[in-house]
Amino acid sequence: MNDQITPILMPKWGLSMRVGTLAAWHVEVGTEITPGDEIMDVETDKIANAVEAADGGLLRRCVGQAGEVYPVQALLGVIAPSAVSDAEVDAYVDAFEMPEIDEDEDTGPSYEFAELDVGKIRYTERSGEGIPVLLIHGFGGDLDNWLFNIEAISEKASVYALDLPGHGQSVKAISNPNLETMVGAVIQLMDHLKLDKAHLVGHSMGGLVAAQTAISNPNRVASISLICSAGLGESINSDYIEGFVSSANRKELKPKLKHLFADDSLVNRSMVDDLLKYKRLDGVQTFLDGLKENLFSNGKQNVNIAAGLDALDCPQQVIWGEADAVIPKTHANRIAAATVSVISGAGHMVQMEESSQVNDLLKDIL
Amino acid sequence: MARTLSMKDAVNEAIDQEMGRDPTVIMMGEDIVGGAGADGEDDAWGGVLGVTKGLFAKYPNQMIDTPLSESAYIGSAIGAATCGLRPIAELMFVDFLGVCLDQVFNQAAKFRYMFGGKAETPVVIRAMCGAGFRAAAQHSQMLTPIVTHIPGLKVVCPSNAYDTKGLMIQAIRDNDPVIFLEHKNLYASECDVPEEPYAIPFGEANIAREGKDVTIVTYGLMVQKSLEAADMLKKDDIDVEVIDLRTLSPIDMDTVIESVEETGRLVCVDEANPRCSIATDVSACVARDAFKALKSPIEMVTPPHTPVPFSPSLEDLYIPSADRIADAVRKTMEA
Amino acid sequence: MSNPFPLEKNKLLEAYSRMKTIREFEERLHVDFGRGDIPGFVHLYAGEEASGVGIMMHLEDHDRIASTHRGHGHCIAKGVDVKKMMAEIYGKSTGSCAGKGGSMHIADLSKGMMGANGILGAGAPLICGAALAAQKLGHDGVGVTFFGDGASNQGTVLESMNLAAIWNLPVLFIVENNGYAEATSVDYAVASDSFVDRAAGFGMPGITVDGTDFFAVYEAAGEIIKRAREGAGPTLMECKMVRFFGHFEGDAQTYRAPNENEDNRANRDCLKIFRAKVIEAGVLSEAELNTIDDEVMALIEDAVEEAKAAPLPLAEELTNDVYVSY
């Protein structure tokens, strides 16, 4: 194969994605693509997102057709300089082996379970080099919140993401649903995985967990990246938190989820259904009620760790979505030592809405 | 999400987890264990199709085989429910309802009301329903309209393994009498089912497929057929919304009405016989409550007004097919 | 004088009081129904008191009974509140069932009364369930299902007898044989010569007692209830008795022989028989029994007055309590 030819492939988002629909192309044959350009929209039953170019160059072929379904890692387009002939491009396309949709094949991160003191914790591991990155999701979330980030970060380091206690597929029966338990789980997992140190990345409540973990265990933490984090001030959108916790059905939950995104059309039926399925698992309602009481009572955040972070040595950064409707972006400036990046066009789930920019920031600190 | 499980195993797992959590959950039925009093193996059957296999070994005091006396043992389950137990009684085929109907519709259904709000009858009566097994007229009915009709009963008919586990757990925890119907032709169907227990509320329909042109309202095996029809119709650029009722009593008419107000077209697909059925019930309510939204007359896809025939060629004609459903959808688009 | 009866004097008074309460309750309903005061149907237990009370004197609240359409006697014997019963029969919101059930569906689960039942024979499976619950929950409660000679032919009763026998349930099958199933004689409708034979056919013991003799019922019931509590399984007991009124109020009773009712009142009145026995033994006096008579009459009078004055259910009660949760 001509090493000047670069394929555009169907991405893999999250653990369970097997196929995606190429909803639309944003570029056409003949366009000079710059890395980071939005080149196509892809939809799965879980989510829709624009795909940004990983590589630059001249778009020579659109192999994938809009509206069609392709397996993960399927060839969708070909980038090659004009010096490469059409015949060579055709040959490349013909020779490309489209992956089978194989239920058993591991084409991306799989997950494991660890039996820790706190209980069973689910995590995913993507191996790489050097000090690993540990991704910590927020209130009511799970490790799939990082579905647009894990692959990219793993180019530069090993990546771990966990389901915190009470979340995802981790243990739900938690007698003390509080910050200490969450921090304990993080350290227990690091011990279990024999991770002496990790770069901690936390989103929303996960940021508070990451920060407190670092404050309590400074020798275990290589850097801290906080994304739309809790723990930096009092304000929080309590309509969202209360609504999330109390919603018992699709009708009640959907409008609350719109607070999470700048582009609320990302809240689709599948997202709402998955969250309802989580909320209906035995023990979750009690857990969320308890955790909310501990962390966010009376419409405010209860814990502030900004001062504690100021005292730490390790590199720190804060990333915020400019349109964050859950925790105000003004909280981004609360830590003296941290570099701050506020990303426009994104809300509270900035790591999903502007994944490319966030991934770059997360890789840069390593 | 998690591992895949068949609907049959989802029933088993739901009962297993609830029996483990609550020793007052007992189950009785004909050969739900098998081998009682005989010299061979215990748990010889675990139910005629093996749905309850393995439960006797785990809960020997909570699994009870019964003689062929539906009135007596279904009635016992009902009586025991008013006395502190939470029984699950299996009617092997819903077609056997006739043999014990008084206990179900005059006793269990009416205690709470007749006794002025003081009785609670937390019994689950689970039964196989539906055609396609060549089991002929007396072993293939749905009978959903009959039990839905009775005030005081709740009626559940899931279409997939995920819903089955969550609705069964809900049924066992519910303090009213629940008729839980399992379509025999769906037992092998699989999907992702969490290992942890979870409960799905009654009276909440599931939107199995979103669409903007036509609303199909259905339940049970017909959900699958409707989704097949929807795939076929996609090629003709017709975008179909499929609503899976999941519970027939209480029924989620709000979701149905909201959908019809968007699409303006309704097809009700029902495997029960057409006179006084779920299809006619939903159609009448929509005609009354969303009349102005309708762009075309409501269509119903049902079997004919006949018993279920034996011969495979006839039974296949009896059961509504994806083709017939697609035709009905097209009809609503033309008008 | 010593007391030859198996009950202490205060218990004898209690037994008489219960029977007299039933009698006067039913007699009063007969009168008031005849005047058109009472909606629907009533089926009166007058004449059968010794059966219900003879058995119920052995039972506690955790023992369960199920009855038939002719259930007032069983309710009163089991301790259901008389005034609430009257209010229920009048369809008032203060009734035992908030006016939602009526005469044929009076129940009080707190007293172990699982309901009068409009469906004959329906109580038998329900009582098997109550007995099964007692076994599983580990207490010594028994279940007693009352049915008549008519209902004894219902499939539900026969199936329940088999079920109770194979599961060794603590159930008493009480056949209150008053000679008539509605308008049909027991001689016509029941194939076996005796109910004891039927019991044997189902693998359980059977006994027959004179249901007009409180003491005969009481003694026999005591033994079979003890059997059941000790885990020895079900028994069938036939109480032979008479009913003083028709099948339902309004029944012309033309199926009876001439003077049959007068004859029953004179010679088979269980209250008269009881009174005679206790007075002759010198254990209770006329005066003591008459005092009870007066108390009972006053209670019934109050019950009727209160029932008549009580409010009817409100319109919103029409649609509530169909389900525990909606």
Image (cartoon, coloured by chain):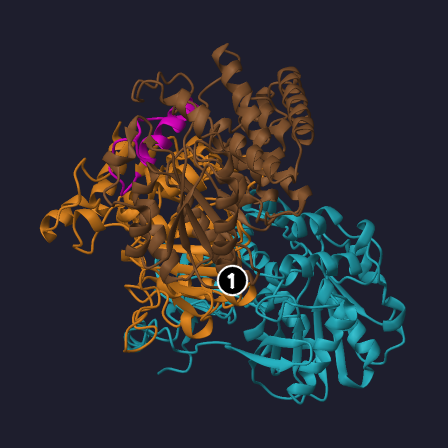
Chain colours: A cyan, B orange, C brown
The residue labelled by disc 1 is C136
Asked whether residue B118 is drawn in magenta, I would say no
Residue A227 percent location from the top left of the image? 71, 65
- Could you tell me which residue is drawn at 65 percent across and 81 percent down? A116
Magenta region, residue range: B269-298
In the depicted structure, whether residue C155 falls above or below residue B299: below
Q: Does the magenta segment cover residue B293?
A: yes
The percent position of residue C25, horizontal first and vertical second, equals: 56, 25
Side of A200 relative to A4 (left or right): right
Residue at 81% x, 81% y is A217
If the image is split into quadrants, where does the C terminus of chain A sit?
bottom right
**Which quadrant of the figure contains the N terminus of chain A?**
bottom left
Q: Amino acid at mark 1?
A: Lys
Q: Quadrant of residue A79?
A: bottom left
Q: Nearer the viewer, residue B180 or A308?
A: B180
Answer with left or right where residue C134 lies relative to residue A343.
Answer: left
Taking depth in this image into account, of B226 and C207 the one nearest to the observer is C207
B112 lies above or below B289: below
**Does residue B333 appear left or right of residue C320 in this picture?**
left
Up/down of C302 relative to C241, above or below:
above
Q: Residue furthest top?
A: C35
Kindly indicate the quadrant of the structure image that contains residue B60.
bottom left
